[in-house]
Image (spheres, rainbow, N blue to C red):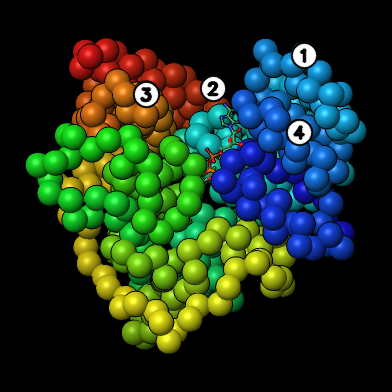
Amino acid sequence: MQTITILGATGSIGCSTLDVIARHPERYRVFAITGNSQLRPLMEQALACGARYVVVADEQRYTEAKALAADMGVQSEVLCGVKALEDVSSAPEVDAVMAAIVGAAGLLPTLAAVKAGKRVLLANKEALVMSGALFMDAAKQSGATILPIDSEHNAIFQCLPHTFTYGNLPASGISSILLTGSGGPFRERPLTDFDSITVEEACYHPNWSMGRKITVDSATMMNKGLEFIEACWLFGASPDDITVVLHPQSTIHSMVQYVDGSVIAQMGNPDMRTPIAYGLAYPERIDAGVGPLDFATLADLTFSTPCRSRFPNLYLAIEACRVGQSATTRLNAANEVAVAAFLDGQIRFSDIARINEQTLNKMEPIDVYSLQQILEQDQLARHTAAELIRGLM
Ligand code: NAD
Ligand code: MG
């Protein structure tokens, strides 16, 4: 029996995690679930899964959350605030933590789980993009196991050899990591239309159902850029070890190419319950509720290289990855601000990449490592991006 905390339980990954867990009551017990603003769905989840704690990230809503819990007959203890998020991630009773808060807000609770040596099911890619070296060092020190949940990284993890040694791909016979991405909804849209892309269009993904921020990131391919950086940290790869491949059908979730010419790919229907189930049960396999691939009806599988002028955010992220931690921390922060402004109707779709690029251009690369330095750079970049956005309005 594994005891699990789910950070970001009300989100797309959180709901899929609870779905998989509910299929295996003999294997998993929920210790805590957390949410931010959707109090009623969070309390409904608490009733359904019997979590011992329910944490609301926003402290201002404590009284409201307590009252609602009492009203709905929720037995779980209600807690509030970032400290409580950290506590339920690091509590001694907890075996595994699903890190599925979106954005920089996920960093502190995820890091708390890492420092406490938990089995960390990492969906939140922003934490690693913001603080890769610190994060991986903390895992090494505490003995935490990081299991990638992002479908591409989960696929790569499944395709690695048993002899894999972190940070030495050639020693494992690997010549390249092939990171696949669908290209999102605007893969074929005329570039001249990009200024007029609406929020509704950008929030529709052809293959995956996800939260709004990652869906917009998929449309700009910033998501693939963040995943490029994430892959470098997770597997100890250098930027030259990774190739991004456009694969619109999202049937192959990524591949590992070997020096002998072999390529090993992980395939499946595009449903996050597969990598979630893999992370929960590793090294075993359990039913995820996902149907098998039907090869009789499978459409053609096609591949190409993503175009720089169509997806400037992807190439910006790859360049930031080469520059180092200060650049990736700032890029992540600027992107969060720019995507929020786009979703709010303040800027155009094509402005997102402009804000990101200009933010990076305004700040000289520096050495950052400590949590304090990282949070400082995150804040500075948010201010810079917000100023640039005001200049556009
Ligand atoms: P989502 O928007 O559906 O859910 C986000 C969750 O985070 C919600 O529970 C929300 O309450 C919580 N949250 C938001 N702001 C918060 C804050 N300030 N403090 C505490 N909690 C907060 O997002 P999602 O699509 O489930 O994605 C979650 C993470 O997983 C992201 O980092 C995303 O990149 C990653 N991911 C998602 C998918 C997917 O298919 N959805 C795939 C791969 C990786
Ligand atoms: Mg992904």
Q: Earlier in the sequence, mark 1 or mark 4?
A: 4
Q: Which residue is mark 2?
A: 372
Q: Earlier in the sequence, mark 4 or mark 3?
A: 4
Residue 50 - label: none
Closer-to-camera residue (118/388): 388
> In the rendered view, does 307 fall on the left or right side of 249?
left
Closer-to-camera residue (73/257): 73
Q: Which residue is mark 3?
A: 344
| Mark 3 residue type | Asp
* Element at label 2: helix
Q: CA distance from mark 1 to mark 4?
A: 14 Å
Q: Earlier in the sequence, mark 2 or mark 1?
A: 1
Is label 4 in contact with label 3 (beta carbons under 8 Å)? no
Query: Could you tell me residue 272's position as x and y percent?
Result: 55, 58
Q: Which residue is mark 1?
A: 63
Is label 3 in contact with label 2 (beta carbons under 8 Å)? no
Q: CA distance from mark 3 to mark 2?
A: 30 Å
Q: Earlier in the sequence, mark 4 or mark 2?
A: 4
Q: CA distance from mark 2 to mark 1?
A: 31 Å
User: What is the quadrant of the N terminus in the image?
Assistant: bottom right
Q: CA distance from mark 4 to mark 2?
A: 34 Å
Asked if 40 appears above or below 8 in the picture, the reply is: above
Q: Which residue is mark 4?
A: 43
| Mark 4 residue type | Met
Q: CA distance from mark 1 to mark 3?
A: 28 Å
Asked if 323 appears above or below 249 in the picture, the reply is: above
